[in-house]
């Protein structure tokens, strides 16, 4: 149980275009989902916390107009990288915790999306 | 806020030996500590976790110990195998139940030599 599916697993796009990444909890409901960015050989950097039915909370330094997050249902959150540039190339990972869980409950991660902007 | 430090950054062991990775945290209110394994090109996978009401938890070759007084917790892998080679991250929660997030350590790249 506790499977998180992330799509696409990799995407190549041209500079100036937008890319949408989907994160789905397949066998549980997730009130909260988290979006991370990971540079090569580095740790996970939290970008934003996505709450179902409300606006996402962005970490300091993360542009909310650049990285649009929508959490329209208890099983789906999307991250849209708008007007992508080569510096947005990275590994993006989502995670989710069970509905009703608190901060001492496990996070379940998707398999990440490798974004390359040319 | 919570601060998590993880050591070592890289670790090489011979197959069959044990590996130990340590993390320290700063927020004494933290009461849940997960460990994740990340293989190349994949998302992190939860391998073991511990809550503050116990000092040790074991699952086959993997164990985690927690010292709340010293605010550190460790991952122990015994009888290491080549498939244990990966990057391991510790984490600790920050915030309250209403608005929380996890702070991750900087990761340990474990290499098990056959």
Image: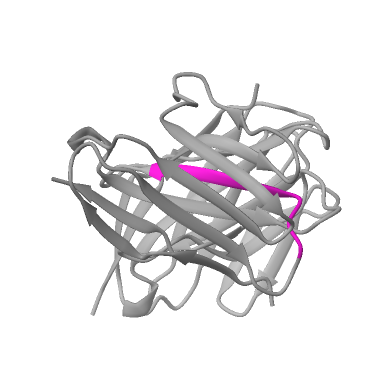
Can you tell which quarter of the image residue B48 is in?
A: bottom right
Task: Please name whichever residue, B39 or A46, is drawn nearer the observer in this view of the structure.
Answer: A46
Taking the image as shown, residue A33 lies to the left or right of residue A44, namely right
Quadrant that contains the N terminus of chain A? bottom right
Can you tell which quarter of the image residue A50 is in?
A: top right
Residue B86, compared with residue B95, is above or below; it is: below
Quadrant that contains the C terminus of chain A? top left
Name the residue at the front extreme.
A17
Relative image position of residue A104 (x, y in whole percent): 78, 47
Residue shown at the point (54%, 59%) measured from the top left: A23
Task: Please name whichever residue, B54 or A32, is drawn nearer the observer in this view of the structure.
Answer: A32
Residue shown at the point (62%, 38%) measured from the top left: A49
Residue B101, compared with residue B47, is above or below; it is: above
Relative image position of residue B39 (x, y in whole percent): 36, 66
Relative image position of residue B76 (x, y in whole percent): 53, 62
Task: Please name whichever residue, A18 or A95, is drawn nearer the observer in this view of the structure.
Answer: A18
Residue shown at the point (83%, 37%) measured from the top left: B97
Taking the image as shown, residue A24 lies to the left or right of residue A12, namely right
Residue shown at the point (38%, 64%) measured from the top left: A8
Q: Magenta segment: does it hold B91?
A: no
Name the chief secondary structure element in magenta: strand
* Magenta-highlighted residues: A29-37
| Color scheme of the displayed model | one colour
Can residue B42 be seen here?
Answer: yes
Residue B85, compared with residue B9, is above or below; it is: below
Q: Magenta segment: does it hold A30?
A: yes
Number of marks: 0
Can residue A107 be seen here?
Answer: no
Relative image position of residue B63 (x, y in whole percent): 62, 66
Taking the image as shown, residue A100 lies to the left or right of residue B77, namely right
């Amino acid at each position: 149980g506790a499977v998180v599916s992330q799509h696409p697993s990799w995407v190549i796009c041209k500079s100036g275009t937008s890319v949408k990444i989907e994160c789905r909890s397949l066998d549980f409901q997730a009130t909260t989902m988290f979006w991370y960015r990971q540079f090569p050989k580095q740790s996970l950097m939290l970008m934003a916390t996505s709450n179902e039915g409300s606006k996402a909370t962005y970490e300091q330094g993360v542009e909310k107009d650049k990285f649009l997050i929508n959490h329209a249902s208890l099983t789906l959150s999307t991250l849209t990288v708008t007007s992508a540039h080569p510096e947005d190339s990275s590994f993006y990972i989502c995670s989710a915790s069970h509905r009703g869980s608190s901060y001492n409950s496990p996070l379940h991660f998707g398999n990440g999306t490798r974004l390359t902007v040319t | 806020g919570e601060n998590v430090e993880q050591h070592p950054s890289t670790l090489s062991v011979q197959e069959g030996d044990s590996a130990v990775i340590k993390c320290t945290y700063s927020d004494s209110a933290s009461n849940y500590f997960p460990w994740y394994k990340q293989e190349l090109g994949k998302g992190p996978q939860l391998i073991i976790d511990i809550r503050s009401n116990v000092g040790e938890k074991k699952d086959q070759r993997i164990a985690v110990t927690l010292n709340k007084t010293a605010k550190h917790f460790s991952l122990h892998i015994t009888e290491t195998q080549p498939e244990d080679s990966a990057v391991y991250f510790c984490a600790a929660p920050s915030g309250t139940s209403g608005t929380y997030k996890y702070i991750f350590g900087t990761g340990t790249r474990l290499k098990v030599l056959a």
